[in-house]
């Protein structure tokens, strides 16, 4: 089905069960959704020790799935399909069912009547003949969550059409030469799409940028690593935040992560902290996740913390041992992946926050960084009144 949809030989096809071992990923442009990532997983009917590991890999993919596709046929429909339906339903993930190999059957069996009564989207296809492939595309579009097409703003709602934002962009040594990092690019595009003005400067050029404007900008957005200097150079009546904090709202839950950042007050020497990054990169010099944040936290706490680092989609099974989870902005992921991690943290009663919020809190400029976000700011002020330090 994936090969027929993408018109490429993405997945190895065989009559032998267990051919698909690790998840196979294929990005493509699926209009009008835009860029999507298809993930072909192993089945959940795999057996044996290796089979259990493959099933675990398949279930882990559900944490980052926005739309599920169960591919089956009339002969194999049974308990495994029902387990998948339960997994999708319990996670509130929309899904469709594809009955492939329909060229081998002359009649629709009772199962389709059951699906109709439950209003479950389904389709009969044949990857061999191509029957139903165009309809499959349309079914995906019809079933996709609204956020697929109508994505929320990163920053445009904070600026407004015809208004200006200044983006402070230090040149990141870890970004390939000639490129900006993804959150910066996405923020620029979001402003342009909203007919907002955008001025992009390095941190040492910010004061000069203010002097060249005949009207104050609606917002200043900075890389979190330059927070202190940018805060000092930005007039107090101009709202200020960071790219990372914008992405706490865009990719996750800013209110939950605001509460999570305030748990820094409770950290003590020897506590365990987990720092998680979505993507792998080769740390260079003063790396934000491995060097700067641990240093700022140590200075704030006044003692050494036990800090673990993870990268990619791997996530510890037992996170209850940690006093705080600090996550990157997750710009390379979809929002569901980040929300799944937030949910796991809340279920384990472990505070979770992100890089930008951690930096702002550790450096004492948290309240100012939350000025553009009234609900998050209220959470901060209310908790401070209840628990003054």
Image (spheres, rainbow, N blue to C red):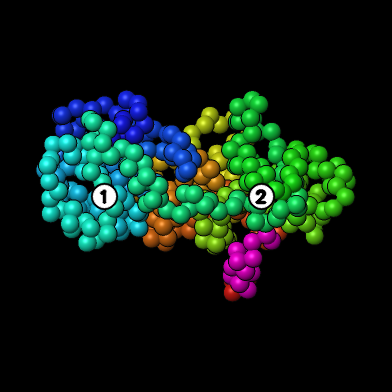
Residue at image position (46%, 54%) is 146
Q: Which mark is residue 181?
A: none
Q: Which mark is residue 122?
A: 1
Magenta stretch, overall SS:
helix
- Quarter of the view holding residue 180: top right
The front one of 359 and 333 is: 333
173 horizontally vs 23: left or right: right
Instruction: Please state the horizontal and vertical placement of residue 389, each as a whole percent of the image.
Output: 63, 68
Position of residue 127 relative to residue 247, above or below, is above
310 horizontally vs 219: left or right: left
250 horizontally vs 97: left or right: right
233 horizontally vs 333: left or right: right
The residue segment tinted magenta is 371-385
Residue 373 within the magenta-colored segment of the rendering: yes
Residue 254 within the magenta-colored segment of the rendering: no
Instruction: Please state the horizontal and vertical placement of residue 192, each as a whole percent of the image.
Output: 67, 44
Say what secondary structure mark 1 lies in. Answer: strand
Q: Which mark is residue 194?
A: 2
């Amino acid at each position: 089905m994936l090969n027929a949809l993408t018109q490429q030989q993405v997945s190895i096809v065989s009559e032998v069960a267990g051919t698909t071992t690790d998840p196979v990923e294929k990005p493509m442009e699926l209009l009008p959704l835009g860029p999507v990532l298809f993930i072909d997983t192993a089945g959940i009917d795999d057996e044996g020790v290796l089979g259990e590991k493959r099933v675990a890999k398949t279930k882990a993919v559900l944490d980052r799935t926005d739309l599920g596709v169960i591919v089956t046929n009339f002969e194999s429909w049974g308990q495994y399909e029902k387990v998948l339906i339960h997994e999708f339903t319990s996670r509130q993930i929309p899904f469709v069912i594809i009955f492939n190999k329909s060229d081998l059957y002359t009649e629709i069996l009772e199962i389709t009547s059951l699906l109709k009564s439950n209003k479950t989207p389904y389709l009969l296809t044949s990857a061999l003949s191509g029957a139903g492939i165009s309809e499959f595309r349309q079914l995906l579009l019809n079933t996709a969550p609204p956020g697929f097409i109508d994505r929320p703003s990163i920053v445009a709602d904070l600026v407004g059409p015809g208004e200006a934002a200044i983006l402070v962009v230090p040149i990141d040594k870890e970004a390939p030469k000639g490129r900006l990092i993804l959150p910066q690019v996405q923020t620029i595009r979001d402003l342009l799409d909203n007919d907002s003005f955008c001025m992009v400067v390095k941190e040492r050029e910010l004061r000069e940028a203010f002097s060249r404007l005949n009207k104050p900008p609606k917002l200043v957005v900075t890389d979190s690593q330059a927070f202190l200097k940018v805060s000092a150079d930005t007039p107090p009546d101009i709202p200020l935040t960071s790219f990372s904090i914008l992405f706490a709202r865009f990719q996750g839950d800013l209110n939950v992560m605001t509460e999570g950042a305030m748990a820094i007050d409770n950290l003590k020497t020897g506590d365990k902290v987990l720092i998680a990054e979505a993507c792998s990169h080769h740390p260079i010099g003063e790396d934000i996740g491995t060097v700067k944040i641990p240093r700022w936290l140590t200075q704030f706490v006044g003692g050494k913390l036990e800090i673990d680092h993870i990268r990619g989609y791997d996530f510890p099974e037992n996170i209850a041992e940690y006093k705080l989870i600090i996550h990157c902005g997750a710009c390379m992921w979809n929002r569901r992946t980040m929300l799944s991690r937030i949910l796991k943290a809340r279920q384990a009663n472990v505070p979770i926050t992100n890089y930008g919020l951690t930096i702002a809190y550790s450096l004492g400029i948290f309240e100012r960084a939350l000025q553009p976000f009234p609900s998050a700011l209220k959470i901060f002020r209310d908790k401070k009144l209840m628990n003054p330090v």
